[in-house]
Image: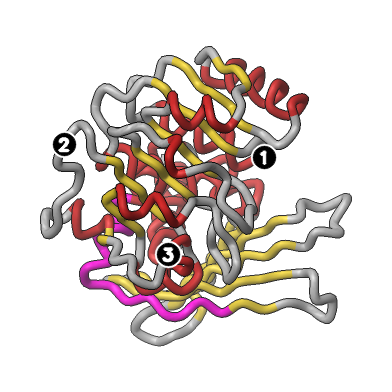
Amino acid sequence: MTTFVSEAESAALVDDDLALEAAREAFLATGTGSTFPVVIGHSSLPHTRFTLKSGSAGELTGVKIGSFWPDNTDLPRHSSTIVLLDPATGRLSAVIEAAAANAYRTAAADALAVDTLARNDSRTLTIIGTGHQALHEVRAVSRVRPIERVLVVGRRADAALEFAAAVTAQTGLPAEPADAEAGVAAADVLVTATTARQALFDASWVAPGTHISAMGADGPGKQELPVALYGRASLFCDLPEQSRAIGEFQHAESATPVALGAVLAGDATGRTSPEEITVFDSSGFALQDLTLAAALLRRLSSGASQ
């Protein structure tokens, strides 16, 4: 029997703790699991976009379909659907609508990188981007480090001010707008959450000891970070081959990022000094979606049995 979980149900089930643990499970699974090349497509309208990310790990096999339909007005522009297959038979096992949960999942990966690589005394978080995903990023990161203030860098002053107020309302943290140079220079942790196609800041603005989690580059041509930064930093990512194909490191052929899962498993070294700059590129991979789906189903089953 196929299980169907609606968007409303998955949104009610997900929270930051569930997403973070599912992310940890996914990154650890990269050592033994399998992921397959990302498929990018569109409808008869070329400006629409959908991606298929598939993989398998242990008893989990399936695909996540993420779509972006920019003309939607009455419906959200972004949607996410996870399809699980029975690994023994290949038959449909579960279909989970997970647009809201996907935002938690994406932020959890960046927060996991912060938890693994950022200085323990990181207190200033700078977020570049003021969209829906950015608020999830701030909330997730502030749960793994003792963040005391948030600096917001946006393209529009009014959007940055409005977003800063939303951060304070949701997290209780003091937040204020900042220009790009001041925000980057002051950051202990810097998170980029944009759709940019060129570097958002100058590499020279990044102070020693900063950790950067970049999540915006997930397709050809996308870019948030300056290539000049890489010679000064230790580089990490979710999947090295994918990161060089569609992530930040597509712009630096010589980059040799380390898989975050290898650091978590103790097979690679993370931060080695307080002065080291660490960069994590998150292009997203299917095992994140499969472990998230499994966690949601477990929580659903637990609730139903009570």
Q: Is residue 35 magenta?
A: yes
In the picture of the structure, the residue carrying the numbered disc 2 is 273
Q: Is residue 228 visible?
A: yes
* Residue 67: percent from left, percent from top: 68, 65
Q: Residue furthest bottom?
A: 89
Q: Which mark is residue 249?
A: 3
Quadrant assignment, res 291: bottom left
Q: Which amino acid is tagged 1? A: Gly
* Residue 206: percent from left, percent from top: 41, 36
* Residue 127: percent from left, percent from top: 53, 33
In the picture of the structure, the residue carrying the numbered disc 1 is 131
| Left or right of 42 in this view: 82 | left
Q: What range of the chain is rendered magenta?
A: 24-39
Q: Name the element at disc 1.
A: loop
| Left or right of 25 in this view: 128 | right
Q: Which amino acid is tagged 3? A: Phe
Q: Name the element at disc 2.
A: loop
Q: Quadrant of the C terminus?
A: top left
Quadrant assignment, res 34: bottom left
Q: If you read the primary sequence from the N terminus, does the residue marked by circle 3 or circle 1 appear first?
A: 1
